[in-house]
Every structure is written in structure tokens, then in C-alpha cells.
Amino acid sequence: MPDLNRLVQRIEQIPTLPIVSQKILLLLSDENVSLPKVASLIERDQALAVKILKVANSAFYGTLSKVSTIDHALVILGIEEVRSILLAFPSTISSPIIGTDILTEPDSGSTR
């Protein structure tokens, strides 16, 4: 059985879904955007949700308690930071992780 820590680290290799990225960016372009709407879309993409939670929980933001919801992370990070994370996060369907099983594949990135 693969080491749980290794599996969690490999979650970051999973690209976000391009359609979700596009929808979120469209929402973020509205200055009157509803944070719960943005949070709802982010929650549909596990890879993006993990990345946002990880950034919100980083020492840089110095929160006193664990940020465990996307809603809370959005408040901590702000819209501009979420946009930056989204733009920096891979969202291509040609990622080498597509078509592989992250639970059984070795770290080398080889496919079946």
C-alpha cells in the first residue's frame, strides 16, 4: 500500500479542470462577485481546493487556527490572490498525470 504522505503530495500534480478555471476567472472578473459562488465552484475541483487551502494555511498568512473551508480560505486570501493562484495552477488536459492512477503509479510519472 502506498505511503499516505506520498499520495497527498502527489495531489498537487493533478491539474485543475479547464472549464472550472474558466468559470472561476469569469466570476472573479465581476467586482460584485459572491464569495460563496466562487467557493462552490472551487469545491468542485479537488486539486484546486487543496492548493487554495494549502496556501491559506501557509505561514505567510499567519492564521491562528487551521483554515479548513474554501469559504474561510477566500476570506484569508482575497480575490486577487485566488486569481493569482488560479492563473499559476496548471489547467491543461495534456498533463502527464491524466490517464494514470495516482494510487498505484510510481512517482516517475510513467503511464500504464
Image: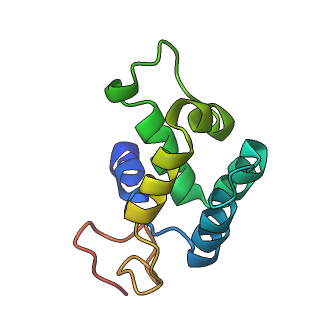
Residue 59 position, x and y percent, is 33, 25
Q: Nearer the viewer, residue 28 or 111?
A: 28
Q: Residue at x 54, y 30 (%)?
A: 76
Does 42 appear above or below 70?
below
Does 47 appear above or below 19?
above
Q: Residue at x 41, y 87 (%)?
A: 94
Q: Nearer the viewer, residue 101 or 78?
A: 78
Q: Residue at x 50, y 55 (%)?
A: 83
Colour setting: rainbow
Does 54 appear above or below 100?
above
Q: Quadrant of residue 17?
A: bottom right
**From this viewpoint, which residue is outermost toward the left?**
108
| Relative horizontal placement of residue 80, taking residue 72 as reference (left or right) | left
| Relative horizontal placement of residue 106, taking residue 47 as reference (left or right) | left
| Relative horizontal placement of residue 22, taking residue 50 as reference (left or right) | right
In the picture, which quadrant includes the N terminus?
A: bottom left
**From this viewpoint, which residue is outermost toward the top?**
64
The answer to whether residue 16 of the structure is visible from this angle is yes
